[in-house]
Image: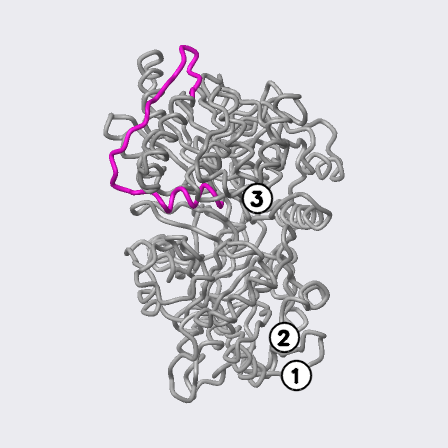
């Protein structure tokens, strides 16, 4: 007997009874908690006895600073999916079915406590049947805030690409499926934003989608209705299967099963395919055929509904205004999304989950650190793949993936999310952390938010700190931060940094030997620019190999002219550009049509088992010289050595470089712990090789598992350094 209510402190329960009964009650809470609940701690306080005669829910309290958190959005549970296709159930084929174990959470919340009136569901008044479920402690929908049915809840509509209504209700879904079967492209409003969808098995439809939206070779993600169908297209481990079927339900990068029964245009030569299960009832109904109890599609392409470099679209009006030229129709609904949230992306190294994009299903769940502050701060992250982090004590709240901070839309998304999260957690950050790059838009954003005294954290050091902060490591480590670009302490463009560091500070002890890189920002797009820059910088010069037949003579001459006359050059130690250069020399890519394309091609063309070795050349000052590497690669190209052998040898070379540096530093410092972070370590082949190589030599190896190794983890590393350096 007693009372329970949501409060800004958490869930408050007043229970009356004998001490034995109350201890048993607490034990039951721990052992029989709801499936998707997360208990951080239970505090028991004895108060004056009140002889309650019943047990009921009181009105939520909203008068203290917040400790409790908002749940991430959750994939449709098996119970709701069963009711969705049960003709006897009153929610049969209702696309917004949910319960306490599934459905929208973060995407619809406006403020806390998490009650219906504080969400976008407030405009839908529950019918008597839904209200009865909501009020019944024995019901699975007891206090499920988005609870609704076809009589009182949201509805779905199909619109033409000009916004004219074609159909509504379940008829809209039937009509949408017909369009998809005809090879049309439909924009579908989901949980945290819009997807652009087509039949993944229809090569003409996929080609049309790629021509309209994505004029590059970036792979599409696909959605399937059932785990058994995934096994037709991909090889599944138990860890991957568990994550796909979990309430988080991210996109999981899976190794393709060959022969790969899907059009090349879905993912071209990529050896992985990004797959997610249908995670909302609406998505599931796009597949399910109630007449023959089977599926109308094996797979649908589901790519983010946005224009390149802009955040995912999330309102009906915005979708029609921005995406009508890309699609043939819109499947929309009237449950408003307040917080846009993209799909999360993960892959697995053995049984370890590596998060590449942390968003739906993970955010805004706080990360609990070993150390905190008695005040709050904002870490503004990086310009690309931006996230921000704020703290309340030792609870670190990392925002969802915000995209690239290169335009006003990105800025507005950042500020909206910042205002929401700081309001939810009732915090008012006193300081702001920024990357050292002077031109990142993030600096202007924090200025717009009113911060004047900015604390700078170097980009690559923040990568290493993100791993240290995840693991709560305070002792010194050897850190390898490899990526495409980051502003260095000396004003150069860093990207292959070796540190001896801890969470309080760092010493840069090694890196790729500097190269004068031509082309400015275009060097990250056109792979021949770093290739020529490296060949010139090492004294090799232009060479007669097939790769140079892929570009025009004047393109090469322009790069050489820039180098000779020192026009638009920058000093670079970028590991990402070295991957681009080797990919170009091997004849794989002359241009990155999307970020990381050339490096991915080099990974996917590698012979994974080859023991090919290239010379490791380290200076006394631990500079990584690449002249010998490039000469050896060029000799192999001239000799007709297969690209797979050269690409595999390059990955072996880089792993051996890290082993040699680690051995030298262990001998010098006694440090035995090695940290790997940065966008280059999204490369599954390189990460796996390096972990195994270092582990076999008795190093302890650490890498990102809670936040992404790419720039999506920068803000977490920034805030970790700040907290530990106080």
Q: Are marks 2 and 1 in contact (CB under 8 Å)?
A: yes
Q: Quadrant of the C terminus?
A: top right
- The answer to which of marks 2 and 1 sits earlier in the sequence is 1
Q: Name the residue that disc number 3 marks.
A: 385
**Residue 545: image location, x then y, percent:** 43, 35
Mark 1 falls on what kind of element? strand
Q: From which residue to which does the magenta span run?
A: 597-625
How far apart are labels 3 and 1 at the CA level?
A: 37 Å
Mark 2 — residue? 329
Mark 1 Cα shell of 10 Å, populated few (<14), some (14-19), many (≥20)? some
Q: State the residue in front, 89 or 18.
A: 89
**Which one is in front, 385 or 446?**
385
Q: Position of residue 375 (x, y in %)?
A: 61, 33
Whether residues under marks 2 and 3 lie with C-beta atoms below 8 angstroms apart, the answer is no
596 or 366: nearer the eye? 596
Sequence-wise, the earlier of marks 3 and 1 is: 1
Residue 601 in the magenta stretch? The answer is yes
Residue closest to the eye, 476 or 701: 701
Disc 2 vs disc 1: which is toward the camera?
Answer: 2
* Residue at x 60%, y 59% (from the top left corner): 60
Label 2 to label 1: alpha-carbon separation? 9 Å
* Of the image marks 2 and 3, the number of the one nearer the N terminus: 2
Q: Which residue is mark 1?
A: 166
Question: Judging from the image, what secondary structure is the residue with disc 2 in?
Answer: strand
On the image, the x and y values in percent for residue 422 come to: 65, 45
Reply yes or no: does residue 333 show up in magenta: no
- Spatial CA distance of label 2 from label 3 is 29 Å
Q: Is disc 3 placed on a helix, strand or loop?
A: loop
């Amino acid at each position: 007997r007693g009372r329970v209510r949501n409060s800004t402190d958490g869930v408050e329960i007043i229970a009356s009874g004998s001490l034995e009964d109350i201890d048993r009650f607490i034990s039951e809470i721990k052992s029989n908690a709801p499936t998707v609940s997360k208990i951080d701690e239970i505090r028991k306080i004895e108060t004056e006895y009140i002889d309650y005669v019943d047990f009921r829910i009181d009105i939520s309290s909203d008068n203290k600073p917040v400790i409790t958190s908002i749940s991430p959005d959750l994939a449709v549970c098996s119970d709701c999916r069963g009711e969705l296709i049960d003709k006897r159930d009153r929610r049969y084929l209702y696309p917004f079915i949910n319960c306490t174990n599934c459905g929208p959470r973060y995407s619809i919340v406006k403020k806390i406590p998490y009650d219906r009136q504080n969400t976008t569901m407030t405009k839908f008044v529950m019918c008597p049947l839904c209200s009865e479920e909501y009020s019944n402690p024995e019901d699975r929908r007891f206090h499920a805030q988005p609870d609704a049915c076809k009589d009182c809840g949201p509805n779905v509509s199909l619109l033409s690409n000009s916004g004219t209504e074609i159909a509504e209700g379940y008829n809209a879904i039937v009509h949408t499926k017909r369009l998809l079967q005809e090879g049309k492209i439909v924009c579908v409003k989901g949980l945290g934003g819009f997807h652009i969808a087509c039949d993944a098995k229809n090569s003409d439809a996929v080609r049309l989608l790629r021509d309209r939206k994505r004029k590059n070779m970036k792979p599409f993600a696909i959605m399937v209705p059932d785990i058994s169908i995934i096994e037709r297209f991909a090889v599944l481990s138990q860890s991957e299967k568990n994550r796909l079927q979990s309430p988080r339900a991210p996109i999981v990068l899976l190794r393709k099963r060959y022969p790969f029964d899907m059009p090349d245009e879905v993912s071209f030569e990529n050896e992985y395919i990004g797959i997610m299960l249908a995670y909302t009832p609406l998505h599931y109904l796009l597949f399910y055929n109630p007449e023959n109890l089977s599926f109308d599609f094996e797979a649908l392409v589901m790519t983010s509904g946005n224009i390149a470099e802009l955040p995912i679209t999330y309102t009906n009006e915005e979708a029609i205004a921005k995406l009508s030229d890309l699609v043939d129709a819109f499947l929309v609904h009237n449950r408003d999304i307040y917080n846009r949230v993209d799909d999360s992306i993960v892959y697995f190294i053995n049984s370890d989950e590596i998060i590449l994009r942390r968003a739906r299903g993970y955010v805004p769940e706080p990360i609990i650190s070993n150390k905190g502050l008695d005040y709050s701060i904002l870490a503004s992250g990086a310009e690309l793949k931006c996230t921000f982090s704020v703290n309340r004590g030792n609870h670190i709240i990392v925002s969802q993936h915000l995209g690239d901070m290169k335009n006003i839309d990105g800025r507005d998304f950042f500020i909206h999310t910042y205002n929401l999260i700081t309001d939810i957690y009732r915090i008012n950050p006193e300081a702001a952390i920024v990357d050292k790059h002077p031109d990142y838009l993030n600096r202007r954003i924090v200025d717009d938010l009113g911060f004047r005294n900015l604390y700078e954290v170097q980009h690559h050091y923040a990568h290493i700190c993100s791993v240290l902060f995840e693991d709560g490591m305070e002792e010194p480590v050897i850190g390898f931060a490899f990526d495409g670009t980051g502003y260095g302490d000396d004003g150069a463009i860093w990207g292959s940094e070796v540190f001896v560091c801890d969470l309080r500070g760092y010493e840069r002890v090694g890196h790729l030997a500097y190269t004068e890189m031509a082309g400015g920002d275009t060097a990250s797009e056109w792979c021949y620019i770093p290739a020529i820059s490296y060949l010139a910088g090492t004294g090799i010069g232009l060479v007669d190999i097939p790769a140079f037949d892929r570009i025009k003579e004047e393109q090469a001459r322009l790069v050489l002219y820039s180098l000779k006359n020192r026009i638009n050059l920058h000093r670079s130690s970028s590991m990402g550009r070295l991957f681009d250069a080797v990919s170009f020399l091997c004849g794989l890519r002359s241009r990155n049509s999307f970020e990381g394309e050339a490096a991915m091609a080099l990974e996917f063309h590698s012979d994974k088992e080859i023991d090919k070795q290239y010379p490791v050349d380290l200076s006394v000052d631990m500079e990584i010289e690449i002249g010998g590497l490039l000469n050896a690669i060029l000799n192999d190209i001239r000799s007709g050595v297969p690209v797979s052998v050269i690409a595999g040898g390059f990955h072996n070379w880089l792993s051996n470089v890290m082993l040699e540096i680690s051995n030298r530093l262990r001998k010098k410092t006694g440090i035995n712990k090695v940290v790997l972070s940065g966008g280059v370590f999204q490369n599954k082949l390189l990460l796996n090789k390096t972990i195994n190589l270092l582990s076999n030599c008795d190093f302890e190896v650490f890498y990102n598992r809670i936040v992404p190794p790419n720039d999506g983890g920068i803000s977490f590393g920034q805030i970790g350094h700040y907290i530990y350096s106080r």
